[in-house]
């Protein structure tokens, strides 16, 4: 099932964007049908080195380009992306199998990131006066120096968002980028790169390599000046170790087992509808998707009934239109994991309230949205990340118990609290150990607020995307201190002991005056 927008000419253009001279190729899968989607070049380790060399050469002029001129490229890119949005959506759907409404949500994040940093980057990247050691005598200026060539390794679940949303601020900050998207989902990020070049990005500044993670991804990690990675906690830990060995910085957005707490004062029917979206967007293949729902025991039965009814209404369908509520899983591997988690829970005594089976009649990787109850610690979906359309319901008695249960995990990526009393709900939210917490929403309120940082606590990652840090992490802070008059050594005629007393008195006076 291949979209009409993926023409031979477009595919040739995207292939040409890959740095791969070794001659190898591979074929990605059309997820809706399981057939062949596209044959693409495959990079080898020498290609990674070539990509970094080309990017480093292109970076020199780009770093010297004034920020305002750099940003002009991204204004044009924003317009192009809106104009070509249908092609982007088609490519995302073809290679991931997600519903078109989820693909549109994916399109929006790079647009929001671009427009946000178009407004904020001039001030964030500008030289900043800092208080000097001695007012009027010594000045200090903070400069923001690009890291160099940034490596971005992006995953398969949101291939367009998580590639473009990270590489755009890296480029704006004056860096070059070598991007390694997942092999299965390379078309949409390649198209994003193509649109950036159409918008006027200098030739060679953004390189794309394709290959297996351990080999090609390892070469990216071992060569870059900074690494950004989104993916599993296991792989992120390995990347952090390799980056640390070279004293290279990294930003890692990793796994999650995200909780939702439903307080006893909610409107049950409306909350159930919100919870369905929070749990089953992109068939649950979302790092910030909810997999654990804690419901006050006074409303547990009513909520479970409403939630199951809303889940059962979801329309599963393969198609390049907006008729499906939920699409397919992306691979046989994802389907296997989801099936294993549900089957393990069922075999050990959990109750399947709705769903719980694959749907090969719809496509090779479809699985029904599934709600479980009576899940206990020995069952796979209790603590392990399922990363699919599976959620477990748990009752609780007090707010303190709900907080304790929600925090009973090594992960800390995203969380959610629903309550009619927003002051109370916000108070509960502040006690949850997660990088983003949403009140009366599942994930979009925090993630979509681009001015605020987003990232994980615990084993859910290091660093933040979005906010000031989402741009400045791609730079080094450099301080330039300038002394106007020689001051730090006493004149020859002044004994050093007397000099120290004068300096001590000056420090005391400056503190009292609030100068230093």
Image (cartoon, helix red, strand yellow):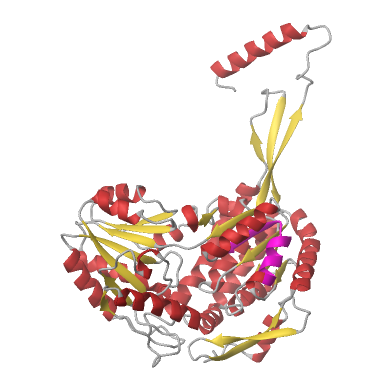
* Residue for point 78% across, 79% down: 21
37 in relation to 66, above or below? below
* Residue for point 19% across, 72% down: 305
Q: Is residue 114 visible?
A: no
Q: Which residues are magenta?
A: 215-230
Report the side of 20 relative to 261 (left or right).
Answer: right
Please name whichever residue, 492 or 385, is drawn nearer the observer in this view of the structure. 385
Q: Quick check: is 346 in the magenta stretch?
A: no
Q: In the rendered image, which quarter is residue 349 located in?
A: bottom left
Residue 69: x %, y % from top left:
70, 58
Please name whichever residue, 296 or 163, is drawn nearer the observer in this view of the structure. 296
Q: Quadrant of the C terminus?
A: top right
Report the side of 325 relative to 203 (left or right).
Answer: left
Residue 222: x %, y % from top left:
71, 61
* Residue for point 68% across, 13% down: 503
Q: Is residue 328 visible?
A: yes
Residue 132: x %, y % from top left:
67, 28
Please name whichever residue, 40 or 3, is drawn nearer the observer in this view of the structure. 40
208 in relation to 244, above or below? below
Residue 239: x %, y % from top left:
62, 60
48 in relation to 137, above or below? below
Q: Residue furthest right?
A: 492
Count of picture labels: 0
């Amino acid at each position: 099932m291949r979209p009409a927008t993926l023409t031979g000419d477009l595919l040739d253009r995207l292939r040409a964007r890959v740095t791969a001279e070794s001659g190898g190729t591979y074929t990605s899968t059309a997820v809706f049908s399981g057939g062949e989607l596209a044959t693409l070049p495959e990079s080898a380790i020498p290609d990674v080195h070539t990509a970094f060399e080309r990017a480093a050469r292109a970076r020199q002029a780009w770093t010297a380009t004034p920020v305002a001129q750099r940003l002009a490229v991204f204004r044009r890119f924003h317009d192009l992306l809106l104009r070509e949005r249908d092609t982007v959506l088609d490519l995302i759907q073809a290679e991931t199998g997600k519903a078109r409404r989820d693909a549109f949500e994916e399109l929006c994040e790079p647009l929001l990131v671009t427009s946000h940093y178009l407004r904020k980057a001039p001030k964030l990247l500008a030289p900043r006066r800092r208080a000097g050691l001695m007012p009027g005598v010594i000045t200090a200026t903070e400069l923001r120096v690009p890291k160099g060539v940034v490596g971005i390794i992006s995953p398969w679940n949101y291939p367009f968002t998580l590639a473009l949303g990270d590489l755009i601020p890296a480029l704006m900050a004056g860096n070059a980028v070598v991007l390694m998207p997942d092999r299965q989902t390379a078309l949409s990020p390649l198209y994003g790169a193509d649109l950036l070049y159409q918008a006027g990005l200098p030739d060679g500044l953004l390189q794309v390599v394709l290959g297996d993670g351990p080999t090609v991804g390892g070469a990216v990690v071992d060569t870059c000046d900074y690494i950004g990675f989104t993916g599993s906690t296991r792989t992120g830990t390995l990347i952090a170790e390799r980056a640390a060995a070279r004293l290279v910085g990294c930003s890692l957005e990793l796994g999650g087992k995200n909780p939702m707490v439903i307080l006893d004062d909610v409107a049950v029917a409306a909350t159930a509808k919100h919870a369905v979206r929070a749990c089953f967007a992109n068939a649950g293949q979302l790092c910030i998707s909810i997999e654990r729902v804690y419901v006050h025991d006074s409303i547990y039965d009513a909520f479970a009934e409403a939630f199951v009814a809303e889940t059962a209404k979801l329309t599963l369908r393969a198609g390049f239109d907006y008729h499906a509520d939920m699409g397919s899983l992306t691979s046989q591997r994802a389907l296997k994991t989801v099936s294993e988690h549900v089957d393990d829970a069922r075999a050990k005594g959990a109750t399947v309230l709705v769903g719980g089976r694959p749907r090969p009649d719809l496509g090779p990787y479809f699985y029904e949205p599934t709600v479980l109850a009576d899940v206990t610690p020995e069952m796979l979906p209790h603590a392990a990340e399922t990363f699919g359309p599976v959620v477990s319901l748990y009752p609780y008695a007090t707010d303190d118990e709900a907080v304790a249960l929600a925090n009973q995990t090594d992960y800390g990526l995203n969380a959610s609290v629903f309550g009619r009393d927003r002051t109370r709900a916000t108070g509960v939210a502040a006690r949850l150990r997660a990088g983003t917490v949403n009140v009366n929403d599942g994930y979009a309120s925090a993630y979509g607020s681009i001015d605020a940082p987003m990232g994980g606590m615990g084993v859910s990652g290091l660093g933040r995307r979005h906010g000031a840090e989402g741009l400045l992490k791609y730079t080094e802070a450099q301080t330039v201190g300038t002394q106007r008059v020689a001051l730090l050594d006493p004149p020859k005629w002044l004994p050093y002991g007397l000099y120290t007393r004068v300096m001590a008195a000056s420090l005391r006076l400056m503190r009292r005056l609030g100068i230093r």
